[in-house]
């Protein structure tokens, strides 16, 4: 290399000739070298290119003995071919009488191989071809890329190189080291004139030694063919220490000096013969190697195929195993699915059977349904007919009742007239009061004594017969006759109940009614008062409702006069023990039609208590009182105005907010009880009287059980009347007028007074036909149990024991 200029370079006197595969060109080079360097020891320099097949075989596919065998065979063939090539050159030289050595290297790149050999063998003189390079011209120094140029540029300067083309020296590169090649130098360029010398001198040498050389060379070449090619394979694969082969023959064989031309001819013929045999042998070897190679390849292919087959078999086996596992799984799933399907099928069959059974029953059921529908229609019609009939009956009943009352009154009047009693009320239980008594009692109707004005007249407070009384002055216009008035008064006076204000006297002259005086204002006063000033506890409110209801139950059971007709909170008065006393019972019987309070009132707070049905018919019934009772109960629950209370409670119940409208001044209402009472009240307020609940069987049964609750709660409460009642004396009306003891079995006699059953029975049993209270003759000896009083006594006793 050019870079090796400074290296010491031991002179190698041998002339190296670089020969390639082109035999013709190689021979031309050798011929020039022999001619030009007569007498010089010549050595062939060759860069062997391994065949592409070997390279390929070494680089790929798997390791196997058949592959190795194929590679070895291929290499052997390659080596033989190469040897054959070099042998041609050696034989050519031998034919020129020159024995030569050879050095070779195995490399793909020729110029690198040449440079490597120059360096390794310290080559001083080298002849190489230049004609193969298209760029090489006679102006060699100008050429750029080719083998010769690269060798020229990179070989050590000590190496003298001659570039020859077609037997002509193109150029030479002088050596840079201290070489003593004087003979070479003289022969550098004048080439003509030395050929004959060369021919002559060398022929003898070649003839003398040609036989030995040829055989030895052949045998050595066969021997060496193993190791160098193996080692060059290593060098080719990148090793930094490439192997070289140098024939030993050249070292021991100096040039021949024989000069006998006959011998030469003989040896030349023999050499040709040997060469022929050699070539023949080589061809055989090559042929056998080729066969061997093909066989190895076939085996290798077969082995690869076998491996492939084994791999495929293994893959197929594992695939088969996977497939088997998958199949097993699928079979398991399939089995469970089959079971499920079977179960479903069984269910399906069962369902179908049931469906068929049901279908079979459908016509039967449809028939029954049709029958039921027609029966329902029939019943509906019957119900409608019954309702219509009931309405008709009710109307008829009411008319008959009115007619009965009217007839009864007329009979009584006629009887009274027939008896010609000077007092007019001699057979009644009320005291006859003169107008002068009224004037005296009220101090001349002093306005100071007036305690109220109603549509049925003014009410005065007074003292009559040393008792506090309330005197009601009825309007006189269109009034009844005295006898009619007296009769009505008598009827009313007979009706006695602990929660009814007792009618104790009457003045037909002034159309005045004398009642017991009730001290503690009315329910209206409490309900309309500011919340906290006159609060009524919820227990008291329920007790008030119970007491009102007991009166209504009593009235409904009482033949003759069974309707209050003007029930409202202003008519609910409280006595000193805070018991309810209902006033104005039956007063509508004493008034003319024109003064009837139900037909001449526009106050919504008054109209609210009126049964909508009487506004149309004008006939008072028990349902009329039930309606008013419903409104009173709603007011007790909520304290709201009568005109809106129905709507408010309905709305609250629908929204579930009843507690929001309950009267909080009454304390903590039990919500469920309040709901129950609210619903009952709303039923009482139904527009249609038939839709209202029955007093005894539906209303009383709800309220009556609440007595105990009221009493228990009130024992600890401070509601009006509760504290004072604990200290009070026995109520007078609880005491039997005969025994003067609290009654245990109170009964109402024909005089309207209540007695202990045993006492009055004993009275009658002793032959009395008169009232123990009035001493008047009794119409009959019938006794009516006074349940209301009985319950009141029981309640009172429970509270005070
Ligand atoms: N027996 C009585 N004892 C004490 N006060 C009574 C008695 N009767 C009536 N009063 C009082 O007289 C007032 C007037 O009563 P009254 O019954 O005449 O009229 P009203 O109830 O206001 O309505 P209406 O016009 O419907 O009759 C009552 O509010 C009550 O305070």
Image (cartoon, rainbow, N blue to C red):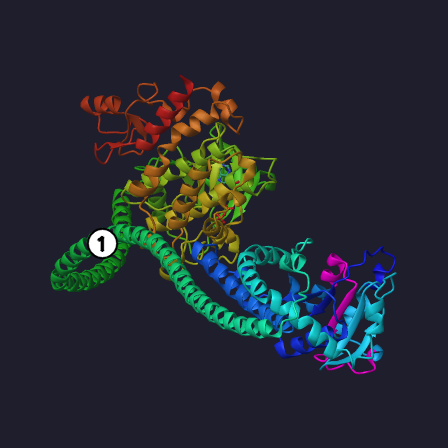
Where residue 62 appears, as percent x and y from the top left, is: 48, 56
* Secondary element at tag 1: helix
Taking depth in this image into account, of 718 and 171 the one nearest to the observer is 171
- Would residue 31 appear left or right of 739 to someone viewing this image? right
Residue 52 drawn at (x, y percent): 56, 68
Quarter of the figure with the C terminus: top left
Residue at point 53%, 65% (across, down): 80
Residue 182, position in %: x, y?
85, 67
The residue that disc 1 covers is: 338
Image coordinates for residue 354, horizontal then vertical, percent:
15, 56
168 shown above or below 584:
below
Q: Which residues are magenta?
A: 115-140
Q: Is residue 209 above or below residue 517?
A: below
Q: In the current view of this chain or complex, which residue is farthest to the top?
A: 801
Q: Is residue 490 visible?
A: no
In depth, the one of 624 and 594 nearer the eye is 624
Can see residue 132?
yes
Does 89 appear in magenta?
Answer: no
Q: Quadrant of residue 746 in the image? A: top left
Relative to 125, say whether 483 is above or below. above
Which part of the image, by quadrant, shows the N terminus? bottom right
Mark 1 Cα shell of 10 Å, populated few (<14), some (14-19), many (≥20):
few
Q: Quadrant of residue 384?
A: bottom left
Q: Nearer the viewer, residue 628 or 754?
A: 628
Q: Is residue 132 magenta?
A: yes
């Amino acid at each position: 290399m050019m870079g090796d200029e400074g290296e010491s370079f031991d002179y190698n006197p041998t002339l190296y000739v670089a020969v390639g595969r082109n035999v013709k060109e190689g021979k031309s080079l050798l011929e020039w070298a022999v001619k030009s360097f007569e007498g010089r020891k010549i050595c062939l320099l060759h860069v062997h290119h391994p065949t592409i097949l070997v390279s390929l075989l070494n680089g790929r596919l798997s390791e196997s003995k058949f592959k190795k065998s194929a590679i070895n065979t291929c290499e052997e063939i390659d080596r033989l071919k190469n040897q054959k090539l070099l042998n041609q050159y050696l034989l050519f030289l031998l034919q020129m009488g020159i024995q030569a050595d050879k050095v070779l290297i195995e490399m793909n790149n020729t110029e690198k191989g040449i440079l490597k050999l120059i360096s390794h063998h310290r080559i001083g003189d080298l002849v190489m071809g230049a004609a193969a390079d298209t760029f090489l011209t006679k102006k060699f120094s100008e050429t750029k890329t080719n083998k010769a140029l690269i060798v020229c540029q990179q070989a050590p300067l000590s190496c003298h190189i001659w570039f020859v083309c077609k037997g002509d020296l193109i150029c030479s590169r002088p050596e840079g080291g201290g070489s003593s090649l004087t003979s070479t130098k003289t022969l550098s360029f004048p080439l003509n004139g030395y050929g004959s010398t060369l021919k002559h001198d060398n022929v003898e040498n070649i003839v003398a030694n040609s036989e030995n050389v040829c055989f030895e060379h052949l045998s050595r070449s066969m021997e060496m063919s193993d190791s160098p090619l193996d080692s060059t394979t290593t060098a080719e694969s990148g090793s930094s220490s490439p192997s070289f082969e140098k024939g030993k023959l050249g070292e021991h064989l100096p040039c021949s000096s024989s000069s006998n031309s006959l011998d030469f001819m003989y040896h030349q013929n023999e050499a040709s013969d040997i060469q022929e045999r050699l070539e023949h042998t080589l061809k055989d070897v090559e042929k056998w190697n080729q066969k061997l190679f093909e066989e190895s390849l076939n085996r290798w292919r077969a082995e690869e195929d076998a491996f492939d087959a084994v791999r495929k078999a293994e893959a197929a086996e594992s695939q088969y195993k996977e497939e088997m596992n998958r199949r097993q799984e699928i079979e398991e799933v399939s089995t469970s699915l089959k079971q499920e399907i079977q179960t479903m099928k069984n269910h399906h069959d069962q369902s179908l059977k049931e469906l068929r059974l049901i279908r079979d029953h459908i016509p039967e059921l449809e028939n029954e349904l049709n029958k039921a529908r027609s029966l329902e229609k029939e019943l509906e019609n019957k119900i409608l007919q019954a309702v219509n009939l009931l309405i008709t009956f009710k109307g008829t009943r009411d008319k008959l009742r009115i007619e009965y009352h009217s007839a009864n009154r007329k009979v009584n009047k006629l009887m009274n007239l027939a008896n010609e009693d000077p007092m007019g009320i001699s057979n009644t239980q009320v005291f006859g009061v003169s107008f002068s008594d009224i004037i005296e009692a009220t101090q001349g109707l002093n306005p100071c004594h007036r305690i109220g004005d109603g549509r049925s007249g003014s009410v005065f407070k007074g003292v009559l017969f040393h008792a506090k009384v309330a005197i009601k002055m009825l309007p006189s216009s269109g009034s009844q006759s005295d006898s009619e008035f007296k009769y009505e008064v008598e009827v009313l006076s007979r009706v006695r109940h602990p929660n009814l204000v007792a009618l104790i006297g009457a003045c037909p002259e002034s159309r005045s009614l004398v009642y017991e005086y009730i001290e503690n204002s009315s329910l209206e006063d409490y309900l309309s008062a500011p919340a906290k000033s006159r609060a009524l506890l919820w227990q008291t409110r329920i007790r008030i409702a119970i007491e009102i209801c007991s009166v209504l139950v009593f009235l409904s059971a009482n033949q003759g006069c069974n309707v209050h007709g003007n029930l409202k909170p202003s008519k609910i008065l409280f006595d000193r023990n805070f018991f309810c006393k209902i006033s104005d019972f039956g007063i509508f019987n004493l008034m003319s039609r024109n003064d009837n309070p139900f037909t001449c009132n526009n106050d919504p707070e008054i109209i609210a208590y009126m049964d909508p049905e009487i506004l149309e018919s004008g006939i008072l019934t028990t349902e009329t009182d039930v309606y008013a009772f419903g409104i009173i109960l709603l007011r007790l629950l909520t304290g709201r105005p009568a005109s809106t209370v129905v709507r408010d409670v309905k709305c609250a119940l629908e929204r579930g907010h009843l507690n929001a409208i309950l009267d909080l001044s009454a304390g903590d209402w039990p919500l469920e009880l309040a709901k129950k009472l609210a619903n009952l009240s709303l039923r009482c307020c139904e527009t249609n009287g038939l839709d209202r609940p029955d007093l005894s069987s539906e209303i009383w049964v709800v309220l009556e059980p609440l007595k105990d609750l009221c009493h228990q709660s009130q024992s600890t409460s401070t509601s009006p009347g509760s504290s004072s009642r604990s200290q009070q004396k026995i109520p007078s009306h609880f005491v039997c007028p005969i025994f003067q003891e609290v009654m245990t079995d109170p009964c109402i006699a024909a005089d309207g007074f209540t007695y202990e059953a045993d006492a009055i029975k004993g009275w009658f049993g002793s032959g009395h036909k008169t009232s123990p209270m009035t001493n008047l003759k009794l119409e009959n000896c019938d006794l009516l149990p006074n349940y209301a009083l009985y319950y009141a006594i029981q309640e009172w006793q429970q509270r005070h024991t």
